[in-house]
Amino acid sequence: MTLFGTIGFASPWLLLGLLALPIFWLLLRAVPPAPLRKRFPAVSLLLGLKDEDQTADKTPWWLLLLRMLAVAAVIVGLAGPILNPDKDTAEGRSDRPILFVLDDGWASASDWPRWIDILAARLAEAGRQGRPAGLLSLANPQPVTMQAADQIAARLAGLTASPWMPTAGGTALPDGAFDTVWLSDGLARDGRSALAEVLADRGRVEVLQSERPVLALRGARSEDGTVHVPVLRSLSGADQTLRVIAHGTDPNGAPAVLGGADAVFAADATLTEATFDLPSELRARITHFAVEGLRSAGTVALADDALRRREVALIAGRDDREGLELLSPTYYLAKALEPTADLLDGGLQDVLKANPDVIVLADVATVTPAEQDGVLDWLDKGGLLLRFAGPRLAASDISRAEEDPLLPVRLRAGGRTVGGAMSWGEPKTLAPFSEDSPFYGLPVPDGVTVTAQVMAQPDPTLAERVIAQLADGTPLVTRKTVGQGQVVLVHVTANAEWSSLALSGLFVQMLDRLAATTAGASADLEGLEGTVWAPLRVLDGFGRLTNAEDLPGVAGPDLFTAPLGVELQPGIYQSDRSIAARNVLAQDDVLTPADWPSNVAVSGLTRPEERPLDGAFLAAALILLALDVIASLHVSGKLLGHAAALALAVLIAAPHPAQAQSDAAAIEATSELRLAHVLTGNGQVDDLAQAGLWGLSETLFFRTSVEPGDPVGVDLEADELAFYPLLYWPITPDQPTPSDAAYAKLNQFLRTGGMILFDTRDADIAQFGTASPNGRKLQQLAAPLNIPALEPVPQDHVLTRTFYLVQDFPGRFSQGTIWVEAAAPDAEQIEGMPFRNLNDNVTPVVIGGNDWAAAWAMDELGNPLVPIGRGMSGERQREIANRFGVNLVMHVLTGNYKSDQVHVPALLERLGQ
Amino acid sequence: MSDAAQLRLTAEEEAARLPALLAEARHLAGTVLLGDHGRRRPGQGDSFWQYRPMQPGDALRDIDWRRSARGDTQFIREREWQIAQSVQLWVNPAASMRFASNKSLPTKADRARVLGLACAVLLLQGGERVGLMGAALPPRGGRTQIDRIATALLSDIDQDFAEPEARGFVPNARAVFISDFLDDLTPVEVALSKAASRGVHGVLLQVLDPEEEVFPFRGRTLFESVGGTVRYESRKASEIRQAYLDRLAAQKDRLDRISRAAGWRYSCHHTGTSAQSSLLWLYRAMEGGAA
């Protein structure tokens, strides 16, 4: 291969043929054009005339040029020109095995499709050259064995980017010499150069890495009511503006975009921030932040409790005595909660309306029955009632004989005092927390002592309600659950009156554990000791959240410190009632570009595609020769002018499909009722759908007053849907997803009374759901459609009686469940009536998998096309399928007419009741 | 058998052409007569000859209304000609005449026949006797003569060139020679001198195709006569154009000289132009000669 700039030639010696062109020119010039034969009666006058110029009339220069160009094109074309030839393959190559090393961590996700393309191309090349290949995934290193390249290529589809950083991966290299192609994410990390050195010892190392900077988000933090999301990039050098989107849920729980902010990189900056100023209601619903337009786990920052500022209502049982703030029951609570929570003041009834997350009752003994009911309702919905004891509680009679609903335990009268001036004994210290306590793992400081407390009555349930106790075993903190919420009683005061607990750091940690505050689990590693966090949802490499019920729990201290990997994936973790997010990047991580050893060749991912040009050149030669034919005819006068012009015009101007026929199609579609099916692009399915609707149309024609015309296949992109009442949509796994415009049309169609019959055609192997490829495709296709809540066809659905009385809806299969729009929840059956009063709309969708088209399909003579079942029962099944089709069309056309109670007597009679 | 069949086929073909030719010729003649209506025509015999009953085909204007008004029948007043003029027609039947450079143009042969026959129609209507050169169809008067002439004119010969028929000149008659006169002119000269010796005056009408007049050829061209017997190849046709045009001019010039010497008149007609003007010229030339 020889290279000339960006064009290389497979056999450059052929180009010497170009030297012959001048000779060719002279030769062509010397040969006169063929004589024009011409009838001419006056030839007698010509006899004896002598041509003055003995040389022949010349071939016109432009014709010569045309021919020369054609010949030159043939020569160049045969020389095998290749645009943008692979310089590496152009250079001398080895036949050593080739090892592909992948940095398949999160940073590769945005380039992943290109990586796969490159890998496929390189593997195909290696396969052609007979070089064995190996694949080393650094994110999941496995011992590498060199295999045939096509076997590796077969594994490509299963490769995916992992949501953690690649490892050093030096463990698993194969023996012997090999060349290496390293697809790198371009980020510096430990062990990279060492591995590069090792690989370079074995053979040539070629590194491909993207020229674009890697972008990532750190975990969001909340400051002063605004949310800051740090954005990092690996390369500086240019101004760059990114849009960071806050994703969350709307009040109904559906995914929604809650806000967006720009992150602007200055030219030399690698770190910037996107700042969101959101109301706390919105902020509480944020699930994650993501960089718009990028798909990578790194560009997703998961939000956890740290973002939420909880609303805590502080209610004290006695009025503050002026000037004695330090004695106020809520002083220490307010101090502990203020940095991380919004504090509410006010009466219990008032704060309940604000629906706070936590209500703290500090030494409040009695609540009114109305307040009690309100609090219980609030607890049922997940509130946390945190009560502190105090003189008033100790003095009151509540929960004495019977357990108060708002207290976890029964209390003994009076409480106890230890270690005081008037009592025996030493002040009590805290016992270590037991394993089943939410406080397990918190260190117990020595200085925390308790001098007075309220005492719990021994009860059968007491032991399980104690979550912290003193060294002598008396309960210090008790808890019970009420509905989804919980009531926690701390048996000492919230100030330093009875205990020094409120003065210690443990107090804050305990509040944290109780999810009363949200300092953020990550803020305090010590506070994580002893907890186990269960993954709720984890990120995959492309930044998608997936359910993670099957993953093991993670010990608290590891959650934020251990490196990410299979054992610890980035995601959302839950422990007790706290939610914590482990993001891909820790709070102090930075992105630095990789530094490669000098003996490693680094190139970008984008390489102009190698494109052979010989075909183009030869085609050009053919076109030139065709032109030469026309031109030669023209020169010799044998060209029939108009015909040639016409032929040329036909050649050049490819026929355009006439757009004007859309009107005719519209008239045709509306002049008769027509059933329509969606063209899937799969010829067999489309033909069967057409035949099926034709058969159904025939059935309707014979049996009912509906007399449809020939069915129509509609192209969702191009055709108008409004003309058709019913759209049959067979699902194939490979059909194209409609465009947004087509979805807008479909939604308009559904909104204006159209019905779509989705048919996954796989009820034999799968019940409706995502178990089959067709089912998954259906979910994907139907996701953007406005489809209401669905239910399996109820027995009294109007579909069961619009024309025939049917209860089964078989097609080619009979076991599938059929789903229709759910009935209004308030529909009630009237006594004595067989049907509920369901006077609502026509269901916009009917979803099932019974392959109805196959059962309906018939040829022009009315013979069924597809065998259904066996014998007479099969014919019966086909008949029922036809009846379902009739009912369906009747339902579309007559709506809920048969749902009208007027028909009840007649129907009752027919039903034999 | 095959001869008979072939003959019949040919005859039918010819018969099919005949009405067209006749109609065209009559039409052409009609236009000329229409233009000449009411003109005094001295020398045609003013004196009354006879009345005869009108027959189908007679023109309305020939009816003698005064005579007819006396009875129920219409009468035609026939005038006697002092000396009935004989006109002999020769139209070149050779292959070289069957040429048209363009589909929209008539062949030279067609144009020549139409002109000749139209002239004959006019003359016959004027009372002259018209015939063809040679012994086949001697000059006669009457309407049926038109059909005979038309039939005779349709016969073609395969030779590329034909010499004018110089036999059978009726003394003191008139003659019309229509041809392209592209061959050697010596036979024409011979014929004209023979005619002059018989006291026959006449007209030479040369019919040429526009292409023959313009010679629009370039490049290497192989020229063939219509019959294919004569060929000439030019390597560069544009080079010999001037020589050709010179020769053509010389040919015309010589024709003019020959005709003047014999007391004939010469004109050149192009198939690209209207036949009417040439017919008018032809008729006038005959008329003038007869005066």
Image (spheres, coloured by chain):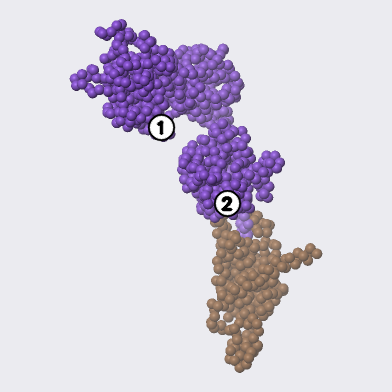
Chain colours: A purple, B brown
- Is A672 drawn above or below residue A334 in the view shown? below
Instruction: Please tell me in which quadrant of the rendered image residue A573 appears.
Output: top left
Query: Closest to the observer: A388 or A623?
Result: A388
- Same subunit, tags 1 and 2: yes
Q: Quadrant of residue A129?
A: top right
Residue A445 position within the rendered picture, expressed as x and y whole percent measured from the top left: 33, 10
A368 versus B142 height, above or below = above
Q: Quick one: SS at disc 1?
A: strand
* Pointer 1 or 2: first along the chain: 1
Residue A811, how many percent across, how many down? Answer: 62, 41
Q: Is residue A479 visible?
A: yes
Q: Position of residue B117 (x, y in %)?
A: 63, 73
Q: Is residue A656 left or right of residue B156?
A: left
> Is A570 left or right of A18, judged from the image as shown?
left
How packed mark 1 is, by other alpha carbons closer than 10 Å (few <14, some 14-19, many 20 or more), is some
Instruction: Report in which chain the residue with disc 1 lies.
Output: A
Question: Could you say which quadrant of the image residue B231 lies in?
Answer: bottom right
According to the picture, the residue beneath numbered tag 2 turns out to be: A906
User: Which residue bears the numbered disc 1?
Assistant: A249
| Real-space Cα separation, disc 1 to disc 2, in angstroms | 49 Å
Image mark count: 2
Of labels 1 and 2, the one closer to you:
2
Above or below for A688 versus A769? below
Disc 2 is placed on an element classified as helix
* Nearer to us in this view, A293 or A122: A293
The residue lying at 58 percent from left, 89 percent from top is: B65
Place of residue A756 in the rendered image (x, y in percent of width and height, measured from the top left): 53, 43
Label 2 chain ID: A
